[in-house]
Image (cartoon, rainbow, N blue to C red):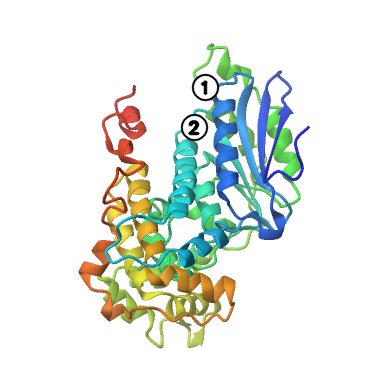
Amino acid sequence: MQNIESPVIFETIATQDGHYIGTMTLNDPKALNALSVDMCKLMSQQLSDWANDNNIVAILLKGSGDKAFCAGGNIRKLYDSMIDTPPQVPMQQPNPYGVEFFENEYSLYRQMHFYPKPIILWGNGIVMGGGMGLMAMCSHRVVTETTRFAMPEITIGLYPDATGSWFLARMPAKVGLFLGLTGANCNAQDAIFTSLAEYAVASDEYDKVVQALTQANWQSSLDGKQEISLHDVASQALATVHHTEQLADSNILSHFDRVQTLVNQGSMYDIDKALTADDFAQVDGEQDKWLSKAVDTYKHGCPVSAVLTYEAYERAKKLSLEQVLYMEMNLSLHCANNPDFREGVRALLIDKDRNPQWSRTLEQCDKAYIESHFASAFPTSEHPFEGWLSQESLSAKVAKND
């Protein structure tokens, strides 16, 4: 029997045609199921086991409780390690716990992205940070009227990591850049518009989703008689329960013209000037609540984070997922070494004074300092993801149809 105290609970659900759906439940509701190293290790091992189990046809990922799927990474231990590791200028060795934390997290995302079977997300409640990475890597995403997602790393002196550079750069019409800079709070319709979700149901219809999946004809994909994949079977099943009348209108679409004008200003400095203008958040002469909150988050956010977000967004447009994770590993470890990440976590999560003292203004973010974040975080050793850039990477194998 599964240990109910385990940070991830694994179970199986029988299908009507004799197969099984594996379920993974993030199990730390008091911390809003914040993603930890232990969670990543457990999920990675179980996914490997289920990938090789012919009885398992799909995976269903969810969070414990109704409040959140996953509200980000559990960074308290990472903060403690940053405090115990004085900044190095230039950095000679990366933070050891930071390496463990990000290597396990980012490796899990890669594993999920290339997983041979459908991974279906029950994206109910709050989804932020590391939870967004999990969401983006699932092949099928179900959202509800309670879904609230954001990438608010600018508030803690980080940048949208956890594959954020990758999926923000792939959102339509550059809206991902706006979301990364402002940490704007988004809903289920926003998730569908930005290709972070495909299906919607009511929050009390989880059992209907499970029923649709268990009644699906998975055998049709396995007997070789039809040109249909397990992913196709999952899509067909989820389409039978999809409906959107319970969802609020998309915040992004409601403000699309304003967002488009902003993100096409040009440089980060041009965007900053437009975003901080007195009239940016005004609609028909009145302050718009959604835009005002986005502007406020940006204004109080870390200037270094803003420039890193902009630069990572531009670079990620041309990179594969593996290349982005390689880049993010360097970025995240440099952030762990530099002062703003630890200061942002202190102000928001430790002392909770919400008054971070950032190390630089936007004007002080010179090119050399920003570029140093993209340099290798392993100057005296091999990057743990070095093989992901080779001709034997999973991206290369997919491209070559190996």
From the viewer's perspective, is 266 left or right of 83? left
Question: Residue at point 53% right, 73% down?
Answer: 346
Q: Quadrant of the N terminus?
A: top right
Rendered position, 32 above or below 391: below
Residue placed under numbered mark 2 in the picture: 115
Residue 124 appears at what percent x and percent y?
66, 53
Residue placed under numbered mark 1 in the picture: 228
From the viewer's perspective, is 290 left or right of 307? right
Between 246 and 386, the one lying in front of the other is: 386
Q: Nearer the viewer, mark 1 or mark 2?
A: 2
Distance between the Cα atoms at labels 1 and 2? 17 Å
Question: Residue at point 30% right, 31% down?
Answer: 396
Q: Amino acid at mark 2?
A: Tyr
Q: Quadrant of residue 110?
A: top left
Between 238 and 146, the one lying in front of the other is: 146
Residue 378 appears at what percent x and percent y?
30, 50
Q: Amino acid at mark 1?
A: Ile
